[in-house]
Image (cartoon, rainbow, N blue to C red):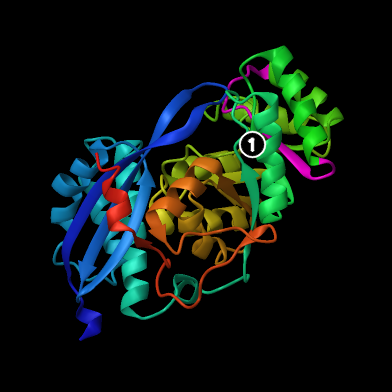
């Protein structure tokens, strides 16, 4: 019986893709991105999940998580996630372990939907036909010309009604770059992301400047670990500017604490970090309970189905690196149009398949 489909194999692999130019934000610089992809098999059907993490995650999944799952029913995703959470207790549940579990959980959801021959959003229960996206990149390593070209490109090619840029390296240049961005995008909504680079008073000062340029979203003005600082920014920042944070939430307790403290106007969650699709849905329920909007962080091809199944969605991040990587590696990758991404209801599951030959060029 299909209801007795047992998991027979869990196969992880990692791929490292160079960036198309040097990239940096307010606190970090990088030249490559690693994606760890997991396939889970049952009843001659294969589910796919992934995370953006480190290549060592493939070994963690193969050695620690895969043996727990083989023999379990592919339909019992909560049981599988609980087994994994318990097993990594002494490794530390956050960070690498969390991203490993997230990739496996998403593969299980893809597998379950495929076994039922349903697009994932139909299995979850659809709230909206599409998810609004904002174009994201604008790295601090870019000169003004490249910054303007990329941001305006999100608008012209994909119809984005909002775009986001990185800030935080150099105070005078930050202000120059924000003005350059505004000049390039006209009246389109402008978001800034400091990745926690500022201390509280500097963040408040920069927020006041940004308000004058029509910035409506300030992401991680201070570290996400500084929940009191985020709350201060929300209370004392300019009217009309939302404070967003949460991409580094590796568990639901962190999401809950942020919401309970009233630290954000928009709670970000990343399904490649916070317990996969199961975690994203649970975070959506927490946001609904706290009357706070949810925003999906990066990985648009993974988020497009669950984003259309939660009630208080604000938007999804259409992030330059991940859009590029997912288009290279996945058949059926999410492509924004008219400012949204739409689940492909003609495909079962998440709707993507790995292009094996293309991926092998980047195998770790």
Q: Which residue is mark 1?
A: 263
- Name the foreground residue: 44 vs 112: 44
Q: Is residue 282 visible?
A: no
Image spot of residue 324 (x, y percent): 49, 47
**87 above or below 129?**
above
User: Where the C terminus falls, by quadrant?
Assistant: top left
User: Where the N terminus falls, by quadrant?
Assistant: bottom left
Image spot of residue 273 (x, y percent): 41, 44
Does the magenta segment cover residue 14?
no
Mark 1, secondary structure of its residue: loop
Q: Residue at x 20, y 46 (%)?
A: 87
| Quarter assignment of residue 91 | top left
> Which residues, given as a range, are shown in magenta?
186-201
**214 above or below 159?**
above
Image spot of residue 237 (x, y percent): 77, 29
Q: Residue furthest bottom?
A: 1
**331 above or below 171?**
below
| Quarter assignment of residue 267 | top right
Q: Residue at x 80, y 26 (%)?
A: 179
Q: Specify whether 270 is left or right of 140.
A: left
């Amino acid at each position: 019986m299909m209801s007795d489909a047992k998991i027979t194999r869990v196969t992880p692999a990692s791929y490292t893709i160079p960036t198309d130019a040097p990239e940096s934000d307010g606190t970090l610089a990088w030249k490559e991105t690693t994606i760890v992809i997991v396939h889970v098999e049952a009843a001659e059907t294969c589910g796919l999940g992934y995370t953006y993490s480190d290549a060592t995650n493939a070994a963690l999944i193969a050695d620690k998580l895969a043996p727990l799952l083989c023999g379990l029913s592919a339909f019992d995703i909560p049981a599988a996630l609980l087994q994994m959470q318990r097993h990594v207790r002494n490794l530390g549940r956050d960070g690498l372990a969390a991203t490993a579990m997230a990739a496996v959980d998403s593969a299980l959801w893809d597998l379950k939907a495929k076994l039922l021959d349903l697009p994932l959003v139909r299995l979850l229960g659809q709230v909206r036909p599409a998810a609004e996206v904002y174009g994201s990149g604008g790295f601090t390593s870019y000169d003004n010309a490249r910054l303007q070209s990329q941001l305006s490109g999100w608008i012209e090619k994909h119809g984005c009604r909002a775009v986001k840029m990185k800030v935080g390296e150099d105070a005078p240049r930050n202000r120059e770059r924000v003005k350059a961005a505004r000049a390039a995008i006209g009246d389109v909504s402008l978001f800034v992301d400091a990745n926690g680079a500022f201390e509280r008073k500097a963040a408040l000062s920069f927020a006041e400047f940004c308000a004058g340029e029509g910035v409506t979203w300030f992401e991680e003005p201070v570290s996400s670990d500084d929940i009191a600082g985020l709350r201060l920014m929300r209370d004392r920042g300019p009217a009309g500017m939302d404070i967003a944070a949460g991409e580094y939430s590796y568990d639901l307790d962190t999401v809950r604490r942020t919401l309970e403290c009233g630290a954000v106007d928009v709670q970000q969650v990343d399904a490649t970090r916070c317990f996969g699709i199961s975690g994203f849905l649970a975070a959506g329920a927490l946001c609904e309970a706290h009357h706070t909007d949810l925003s999906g962080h990066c990985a648009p091809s993974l988020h497009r189905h669950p984003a259309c199944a939660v009630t208080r969605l604000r938007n999804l991040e259409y992030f330059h690196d991940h859009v590029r990587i997912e288009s290279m590696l996945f058949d059926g990758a999410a492509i924004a149009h008219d400012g949204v991404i739409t689940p492909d209801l003609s495909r079962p599951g998440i709707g993507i398949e790995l292009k094996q030959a293309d991926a092998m060029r980047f195998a770790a």
